[in-house]
Image (cartoon, coloured by chain):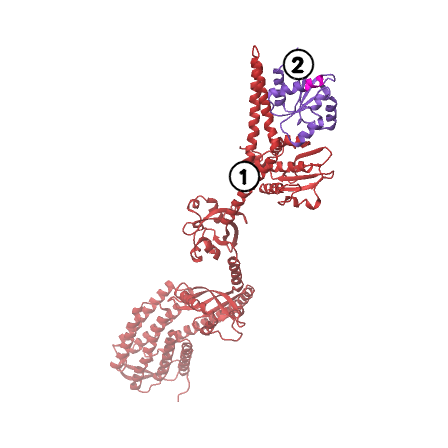
Amino acid sequence: MSASGGLIVHVVDGDDGVRTGFARLLRSAGLDVRAYPSADRFLDEVDSVARGCVLLDITTPGITGSETLQRLKDKRDLLPVIVVSASDTEATQRLTHELGAKMFLRKPVDDQALLDAINWVTKGPVEA
Amino acid sequence: MAPMDWIHAGWTGMTVVSLMLAFVYLSIWIRQRRLGVYLSFALCSLSAAAIAIFELFLMRASTPELWAQLVRWLHVPLAALLIGLVLFVRLQFRASRRGWTAPLIAVALAALAANFLTGVNLDFREVSGLQSIHAWNSAPISVPVGEPNPWILLGTINALLMIAFLIDTVVAVRRRGSAEERHSVFLVCVSIIAFLVAAGTWELVVSSGLIVAPLLVAPSFLGISLVMAYLIGSEILRASAMATSLVTAEARLLETEQQMDLAASVAGQGFWSWDTGGIEPWLSLTARYLLGVEPGELFEWSKYLERVAPEDRARLSNAIQQAIRGDGHVHVEFQIATAGNDVRSLVALGKILFTQDHVPLHSYGVIVDTTERKMAEERFRLLVESMPSAVLLVNDRGAITFGNKQSESMFGYTQEQLIGMDVEALLPERYRHGRADMRRLFAGDPAARNAGASTELVAERRGGGAIMVEIGLTPIQIGQEHFTIASIADIGDRKRMEREAALQRDELAHLSRVASLSALSSSLAHELNQPLTAILSNAQAGARFLARQPPDADEVAISFTNIVDNAKRAGDVIRKLRSMLRNDRTEFVRLEIDDVVREVLQILRSDLIDRRVEVALELAADLPPVKGDRVQLQQVLLNLMMNSTDAMGSVAHPRVLTVRTLLADDGEVEVQVADNGPGIPEQDLARIFAPFVSGKKGGMGLGLSVCAMLVQAHAGTLWATNNSDGGATLHFRLPTHADSSSPNPD
């Protein structure tokens, strides 16, 4: 029904304004979007066979728990992670690395850069 | 010599009685010379004695010539008797008009002259013979036979005039005198009148030859003698009664004096009393002691003056002279040198009594030892002079009664100028009438007096310079008078320093804030980037919805709404940052501390997430508001939370920052910022608030010292403790807003 061809973009961001903004932007570009206010909600609700990618704000509350990190890591083969953050401190980058994220984007993110990134991470494994 | 018959005995007896009376009155007169009345009656009695002797010889006269000659000389004592009686009555009763005396004496003297110049005597022009008669078995008595002298009329006139004079006296005395005086005047005058009537009539009758009898005056005088003897006797009785009562009164007086002296000596007071005529004043034992007069030493004023302090001598003499010239009140303070060469301060209080002509008669009074008081005054003066601040003593009418040296230099007036000045004159013009509370304060209103309370206000120097002063007022009572001690400190320098310190504190706080915020720059950038990200995404989404065919107007509208919301959010973040970065002057307002905690957490939010620090918020609801500067309290909380976060930087376990607010036991609001880091070494718990003590590498060590400074400026306290389960807690307490019931005015 959409141009994404069954791909779902999971937006995980604790900030209401940012989450809503990303979700609306992706939807306006014709993508299928699910939005979650926290990592735990995402992990609880996401379908185990879902395909697509995760757009994760690294400063979302609850993300730093080791159990959460492990569960996210378990999902990364099915759902590659794009980390977005308003800050790019050492701590942020370390966490990005720990997660094994495919990409890191600095907020604010231009629409084309975001769409290109999603396109790249979702196609990559298929071609690989 | 004829045998002693009753006539001889009687007349001799009359002579003796008269002489005795004369002697008694004469002796009284000699002792009390001023009482001429006694002399005059002594004269009467002497004359009466002489008359009796003459009469005795008359009755024994052998020839008419001798008889006539004796009568002629008899008139001399008779005239003396009459004049004496006039003087006596006049002096004794001082009642009749002055006009009487001279004519009476003149007529008596005229009669005496007629006695010598006409006939053989005043009674007879001629005595032709003598008859011998016998009276009641007596020896023969010579009685005259002859022609009467018409000049006897002068004697009769004399007697009648005297009777009139006596009646006048009786009437006058009865009108004004006391009962006693009325009684005596009646007796005296009636006895004299009886004498005059009896003697005069007898003389007339005998000289005119109506009866054949001797000329007799003396027996009539007997009545007067009796009355006078009676009066003397009553006077002696009265005098003795008076003497008795005087002795009793004196005894009582002595007793009272002793009691008074005892009481006075206990109170350190001595009595003196001085009869102006007397050489030495009477001094009570205490008075002698106080004046330094040795026992047995004679008190001599001129000699004593040498013991008085030289500067007091003239004053002491002047005070006495003034009292003598004026109303007689003496009040003088002076100092004397005692035997031991100590100086004793005395106050003499007294009264001089005067005669009607204002001649000093008697003086009396007390002497009080004021040495202790003088020394206390001196100590007070030295104490006040040595005080570093200006001290004024102000009475309940607002007049300055004392000012120390410091008040001279502070206000530019001399001590003499200050005394008597209205204290308001030391206030600037614009305060003089507005400061009713100040006036009331000095006017002795107890409600306005608050001992030890300090008031800051502006005072005025002589010539108009304004000075900032702090006044401490202490009400005191000296005797019946209320005073206020005003202790005035020039706080101009202190105020300037306080202002400078406040400016420096604000500056330091500002710098510290800028430093804190720059440390937070990345998380602050995050705070701004979030709404910017939302705005950008919504704008680009809106553009895409608009580009669709047909454009999706509903989605575009939602995008705009979201953009507006997030732009406002970005504005909020910027506004908060600006207020933290501005260097505004401290402004104390009513604040809810929980709000301040939330504001700070918002600023720190992303930083805490970044550092993987969980926040546990335990805010007590319904805390009373505090009085504080919002930005400074935000800064304190920001610093404390950043410190705690830093302290947890190296721990492996989950990092928890606990922020608690609570109402402390003492009614103050307490804020606790706790971490679960390694804690603070015990020896550093107090030291960490000193400047340049830092637990962090690269830290300036100003964060906590700035916090301590700011909390102190809020009249609060800041301290640190270690938690029992690890980590440290920083606490600070703030006093609640005085008016915690009214809503925040901002």
Q: Secondary structure at mark 2?
A: loop
Eye-nearest disc, 2 or 1: 2
Amino acid type assigned to the residue bearing label 2 in the image = Ser
Chain B shade in the render: red
Whether the magenta-drawn stretch holds residue B382 is answered as no
- Residue topped by disc 2: A4
Amino acid type assigned to the residue bearing label 1 in the image = Thr
Q: Position of residue B514 (x, y in %)?
A: 57, 37
Magenta stretch, residue numbers: A121-128
The tag on residue B586 is 1
| Label tally | 2
Q: Chain of mark 2?
A: A
Chain letter for the part of the structure drawn in purple: A
Instruction: Between residue B4 and residue A82, name the one nearer to us.
Output: A82
| Label 1 environment density (alpha carbons within 10 Å; few <14, some 14–19, many ≥20) | some
B309 is higher (above) or lower (below) than A50:
below
Question: In the rendered view, does B577 fall on the left or right side of B646?
Answer: left
Q: Secondary structure at mark 1?
A: loop
Instruction: Between residue B385 and residue B115, name the one nearer to us.
Output: B385
